[in-house]
Amino acid sequence: MNVALCLMAYGSTVAVFGPPVLHRLTRRGVAPRLGVLAWLVAIAGALGAWVLAAGLLVVEFATYWRHPSEALRACYSVLSFPVHIHGGWGAQLVTYSLAALLASGVAAMSLQAARVALRLRRRTMAHGRAVRMVGRELPDVGAVVLDSPEPQAYCVAGRPDTIVVTSAALDALTREQLAAVLAHEHAHLRGRHAALTAVLRAVATTLPGLRLLTAGSVEIGRLLEMCADDRAARVHGREPLLGGLLALVGAGARVPVGALGAAGTAVLARAERLVDPVTGMHRATNRTALLGVIAATVIGLFEIAVGILFCSTMIN
């Protein structure tokens, strides 16, 4: 039982202290890809620990009456204190009910998250099909052009992936700026950023009270925009990309749900990165801190997992 309690305590610690620490380290986007990894490791570590804790409790409740061996008692005397429930079928019924409740709760939350993610994907794919039907493809632009008075550029993942540029955006952007904005959207599609943000949004919607998920979903979305900025800036330069973002930032229309817009997220912070990049020393310090957070998160969960494996080996 202590193993499960340790897992729950570990997950709760990561969920409470992870967001402020990670926000401080990733707010400027010094190392956006490493920042995305740090947030994902924290989210996976907390959720994984809670799921493992629920699984351990289910297994212990369901098998305790069938495995009263000395190995089980010896193992849990080191890592746990066994659940000693004295009584007949009534006590066993209580333990099996608790196990079923935990298992059904985890299954229900997983199913709900999968439903939300599937619904978001269907909406984005439907939007992509509609855009390709009403828009016009320009081979030299590499995107579908929509007639609209609002300057916008965004990508929609689907089959096939679609980059959408409005006619107002074509009028507002220079050739160099358009190339930089399109490179930004291509970076999103190559990195499968839309799929990642959709999954995070689905999980955050399922557990809306968990700050690690709600804040993590927003922060990862911001960092993914910075990742796409960096890829586009390496090819086309910082100035054309910055000019393209500023030309699109005043659009009044919102980007469709599930789409990733070039000027739809944290434009001010991204513009500051492009205008005033950090020094090499600052970048190295930030990377070291992020790697330390990732290592601490992984090692903590790994140590608990080793204890679980030790238990399983002794029982078998």
Image (cartoon, rainbow, N blue to C red):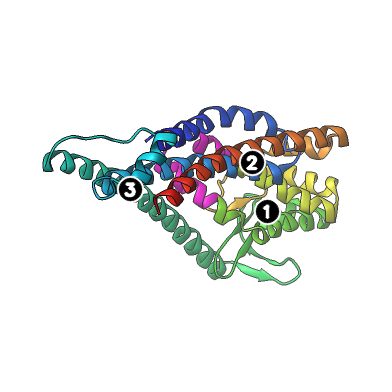
Looking at this rendering, what residue extends furthest in the bottom direction? 139
Residue matched to label 3 = 59
Q: Which tag is nearer the camera, tag 3 or tag 2?
A: 3
Q: Which element type, helix, strand or loop, lies under badge 1?
A: helix
Span colored in magenta: 197-218
Instruction: Estimate the x, y position of residue 116 in percent, counting from the top left.
Output: 41, 52
Which image quarter is the C terminus in? bottom left
Instruction: Estimate the x, y position of residue 270 in percent, counting from the top left.
Output: 73, 39
Residue matched to label 1 = 168
| Mark 3 vs 1: CB contact within 8 A | no
Residue matched to label 2 = 38
Q: Who's the residue at 82% across and 37% down the image?
A: 284
Q: What's the amino acid at mark 2?
A: Ala
Q: Which element type, helix, strand or loop, lies under badge 2?
A: helix
Q: Which mark is residue 1?
A: none
Q: What's the amino acid at mark 1?
A: Ala
Q: How far apart, in angstroms, are the residues tagged by discs 2 and 1? A: 38 Å
Of callouts 3 and 1, the N-terminal one: 3
